Amino acid sequence: MNEVSQITEFGKVFIMMLMGILIVTLTFFASRFIAPRKPNPEKLTSYECGENPSGNSWVQFNLRFYVIALIFLLFDVEMAFIIPWTTIFGNADLVAADSRWGWFTLTEMFIFIGILILGLVYAWKKGDLEWVKPQPKIPATDQAIPLSVYDTINNERYTVKPFTTERTVEAVATSDVPDTAAKPAPRPAFKPTFRKPASS
Amino acid sequence: MELALVIQKFILVIVIFAVSLLVAMYSTWAERKVAAFLQDRVGPNRAGPGGILQPLADGIKMFTKEEIIPLDSNKFLFIAGPSLAILTACIGSAVIPWSTPLTIGSKTIPLQVTDINVGILYIFGVVSLGVYGILIGGWASNNKYSLMGAIRAASQNISYEIAMGLSIIALLMSTGSLSLKVIVEQQSGFWAHGWFTWNAFQQPLGFLIFLVCAFAETNRTPFDLPECETELIGGYHTEYSSMKLGFYLFAEYINMFVSSAVMASLYFGGYNFPFMHHLGLDANWLSILGIVAMLLKTFFFIFLFMWVRWTVPRFRYDQLMDLGWKVLIPLSIVNIVLTGIWITVKDIYFK
C-alpha cells in the first residue's frame, strides 16, 4: 500500500495481540461453561503421589538457580548492546568511506566480547556453572558365585536352527505320548475357603 | 481506506491464528503418527480414516473435562499462567514473512502481519515472556513438582537464550538488518555469486547452535526436563486439568511451529525456493508457491522436532546446564569472532 498509513507497524502487533487475547478469553470462557464443576475436598487437594500433601511448597529453593539468573542478566544486557553494532558492522557505505572501518569496529567488539568472556571464565572458575552431579553408589554384596560363571554365561552363543515345516522325529515322539491325558490332574493340596470375618 | 487496511490486517491475523492453531492441532496427531512409525506401531487409527479426526476428539475431551483449581493455589495466577503461555506462543508469529505480497487488482496484500525493523528482537522478547507463563503456572499450583518443573524451565530457558542470541548475532553481522523481511529477501533464489544464498550455508555452526537452543526453548526432548514424567509427574502442569492443561500443551506445539518457521526464514530462505527466478512465473504465482515452500520447510523442521524426540534420550540436569553454558556459549562466541574476521577480510581483500 503506497499511501502513508496511520497504522504503524507496532499498531499491527497490537492488532495481533488483541486478537490473541480475544481468542484465549473466548476459549477460556467456553471451557468454563462446558466443563462440569463438582468440586469436593479430596479433588481440591494438591497432588502429591496420593499422600496427603505435607506443608506448603512455597519455600526457599536452591540458590544456584538464582545465581544462574544473575549471570543471565549480565549476558543478556551485553547481548542487547552487541545487536545494534551488528547492523552497522558490515554496512557497505561505511566500509567504502574508510577501509579501516571494518578492522576498527571489529577490534572494538573484540574488546567488548573479551570482557564478556572474562565474565564467563570468572563464573566458571568460581564454580557457579557447576551443577550437582549425581554420584551413584554401586552396592557391594558378598556372593559365593565366582565371576567366571557370569563370563561363561555371557560367552554362550545361541545358534538358530534352520526352519523346516516337517516335524522332527523327537518332537513327534514327545508330543504323541498318550499318558498325559490318562493321568488325572493332581488335586490342589490346599483348598482356599472364604469366611466372613467375625463381626465385631 | 484506513478502515480497509485495518480490516485486511484483521483478516490476515485471523488466518494466521487459524493456520497456527490448525498446525498445532495436527502436530499432536503427527507426533503420535511419527512416534508410531518410528516404533513400528500403527498409531491413532480409530477416529476417522487414519485417525485424522483424533485432534478434534482430543479437543472435545479437553473442553468437557472437569476444571479443578486446587484450594491451596493462587487462583488468579493459576488461571493467568496458561493464558499467558498460549498468548505469547500465538503472537510470536507476527513478524514472520509467509510470502511475498499478493497483488489483487490494484491492491497489494503483504503476507506478513507486521514488518517491524527489530523483528528478531521482537521474537526474542515474546519467547522470553513465554517463560513467565510456565513459571507463574508452576508457582501458583502450590505443588512441589510443579514448582520444581517451573524453576527448571525458567533456568533452562534463560541459559539457552544467551547461546541463541549469540548465534543470531553472528547471523545479523552478515545480514546487517534485524527485519525478517529483509533477511529473507537477501536469501532470494538458491544460488548466486558462486555460493548458496541461504544463510544455513554461510552460518552452519550458528544454525546448529540455534537448532539446539530452539529445542531447549520449546522444552522438547532431549531438553524436556521441566515436564519429565519419570521424575516430576507432569512438571509445571501437574495440577492442571481441562482446557488450562490444553493451553499448555497447545502452547508447546504452537511454539514448535513458530520456532520452525523462524528457523526456516532465518537460515533456510523462508519462502524462497531453488530456481524461483528461472520459472518465468508472475508475481502472484511466485507468492503462492512461496507460501507452499515456506510451509514445507516449516513442516520439515516440525518433523525434525518429532524425529529427535523419539530418537534421543533425555539429558540429566547437570549435563543440560553444562551443554548450555560450557559448550554452546563459548562456541557461539567463537562463531561471532570467526564471522567478524571473515566478513572484514572479505570486504577489504576480496572486492
Image (tube, coloured by chain):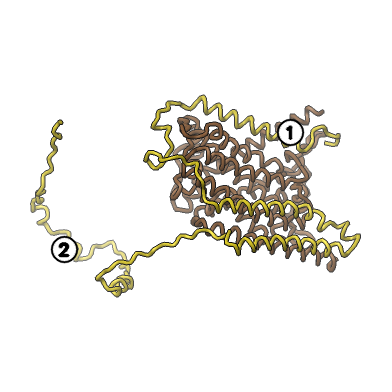
Chain colours: A yellow, B brown
The answer to whether any part of residue B306 appears in the image is no
Quickly name the residue at label 1: B9
- Give the residue at the far top of this rendering: A33
**Could you tell whether B270 is left or right of A44 in the image?**
right
- Residue A21's quadrant in the figure? top right
Secondary element at tag 1: helix
Amino acid type assigned to the residue bearing label 2 in the image: Ala
The answer to whether any part of residue A155 appears in the image is yes
**Could you tell whether A53 is left or right of B169 in the image?**
left
Secondary element at tag 2: helix
**Could you tell whether B190 is left or right of A181 in the image?**
right
Q: Is residue B217 above or below residue A22?
A: below
Quickly name the residue at label 2: A173
Marks 2 & 1, CB-CB < 8 Å contact: no
Image quadrant where one finds the N terminus of chain A: top right
Q: Is residue B272 above or below residue B191?
A: above
Image quadrant where one finds the C terminus of chain A: top left
- Residue B198's quadrant in the figure? bottom right
Image coords of residue B187 (percent x, y): 75, 54
Image coords of residue B39 (percent x, y): 45, 53
Q: Residue at x 68, y 62 (%)?
A: A117
Q: Residue at x 73, y 38 (%)?
A: B113
- Give the residue at the far bottom of this rendering: A148
Q: Residue at x 30, y 68 (%)?
A: A161
Query: Of the residues tagged 2 and 1, which is closer to the observer?
Result: 1
Image coords of residue B200 (percent x, y): 69, 58
Amino acid type assigned to the residue bearing label 1 in the image: Lys
Tags 2 and 1 both on a single chain: no
**Could you tell whether B199 is left or right of A157 in the image?**
right
